[in-house]
Image: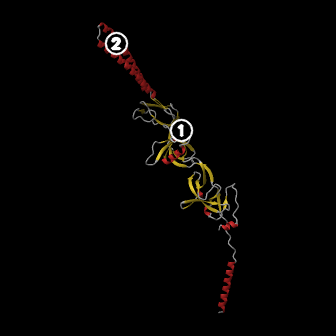
Amino acid sequence: MKFKSLSLSVFAGGLALVILGCDSAPPRAEPPPPKVSVAKPEMRTIADFDPFNGWLQAAQTVDVRSRVRGHLDKVLFTDGDLVKKGQLLFELDPRPIQADVEAAKDQVKIYDAQFVAASKEEARLKELVKKGGASQSQVDAAEAQSKSLEAQIQAGKQEVTRKSLDLEYSKITAPIAGRIGRAMLTVGNLINAGGSDPVLATIVTVDPIYVYVDVDERTLQRRMREKQGTPTRPASASVREIKIPFTFGLETDEGYPHSGVIDFANNKVDSQTGTIQVRGTVSNPDGVFVPGSRVQIRVPTGDQKPALLVPDTAILSDQDKKYVLAIDDKNVVHRRDVQLGKLLDDGSRIIRTGEKGLTSDDWIITQGIQMARINYPVEPIRPEGAAPTPAPTTQASAATK
């Protein structure tokens, strides 16, 4: 019994020491505020836009064909050359055509000789009819023969002119200036002129070049209404008169570095797609744009105006609402609701301020968002050169808990 009492006393004393030790433990240290990167929203003057897919097309395209039949004798260009209007491209063997020209000229000489003889016979019969040595019918026949030969002479001369044109057409020249494709036929081939005549080569103009795009009718109508009715443009101004600017980029370009002007819209809207085809003209002095290339196009939906931009990675979602995390002068985190606009190529997002009025003077969290908590302080890391703000005080930190 004495042993049990002693054991209980020892246990009670140890328990008392443990409880006393717990009451005297030092308080737990508060963790420091998390470090986050912050930046101010950027104010930039930009124009809102609508993106579209389009394609390049030459302003003029000509299929070079032969007007006459003959064997191809010479090809006088290199595939892909830039050619001038009137430049000699192909030559057919001119000898058969030259022989036809000479034959036509000889036929005219024959008619000339026959006409001289017929004219003399007509004059002789007219003298005889006065003496009763010939009848009037003989005179009339001689006169008809003379006029017939005179007409054949004129027809023969026209045939000489036509054959001479064929000889000229045996030298095939460029009808327009531009870039020529490859020769579709080589020397020695027989070329038939007519309904089945082959294409010898194709020439496309280089400068300017057209950009075609199918635009929804709302975008075009809205943009035209913005430009019409001004002192310089009447309400009936056409697309060509309004000159809507646009920017575009090739598939290998970064962004939209090229620009042009929309100067044509089709005369009807596609009822199935609700789009209308428009055309822009682009300067191409160096020939870098190739017809048929696909391009990405931006058509502005309004004039340039100031816009507030934030990094798209700084935007958070709460169901159907979007917001950013901003800090105040005590480095305490607050939520700012925003409305989103277009996403730009550099990763910036156009925003429209929400009810709490985000401005370009606010500091928003751009990195470390997952460590920040609303109504709790953070340790902001500002861009180099930015003015620092005082760290939060102990009272401020305690007040936010």
Q: Secondary structure at mark 1?
A: loop
Q: Position of residue 218 (x, y in %)?
A: 49, 48
Q: Which circle's residue, 2 or 1, is located before the other in the chain?
A: 2
Q: Quadrant of residue 369?
A: bottom right
Which of these two is toward me, 244 or 115? 244
Q: Which mark is residue 50?
A: none
Q: How many marks?
A: 2
Judging by the rendered image, the residue that carries numbered circle 2 is 122
Judging by the rendered image, the residue that carries numbered circle 1 is 208
Specify the quadrant that holds the C terminus.
bottom right
x 67%, y 67%: residue = 399
Q: Position of residue 332 (x, y in %)?
A: 65, 63
Q: Secondary structure at mark 2?
A: helix
Which of these two is toward me, 335 or 194? 335
The answer to whether 234 is drawn above or below residue 385 in the figure is: above
- Count neighbours of disc 2 (C-alpha within 10 A) and say few if under 14, some if 14 to 19, many if 20 or more: many
The answer to whether 119 is drawn above or below residue 279 in the figure is: above
x 33%, y 8%: residue = 127
- Count neighbours of disc 1 (C-alpha within 10 A) and say few if under 14, some if 14 to 19, many if 20 or more: some
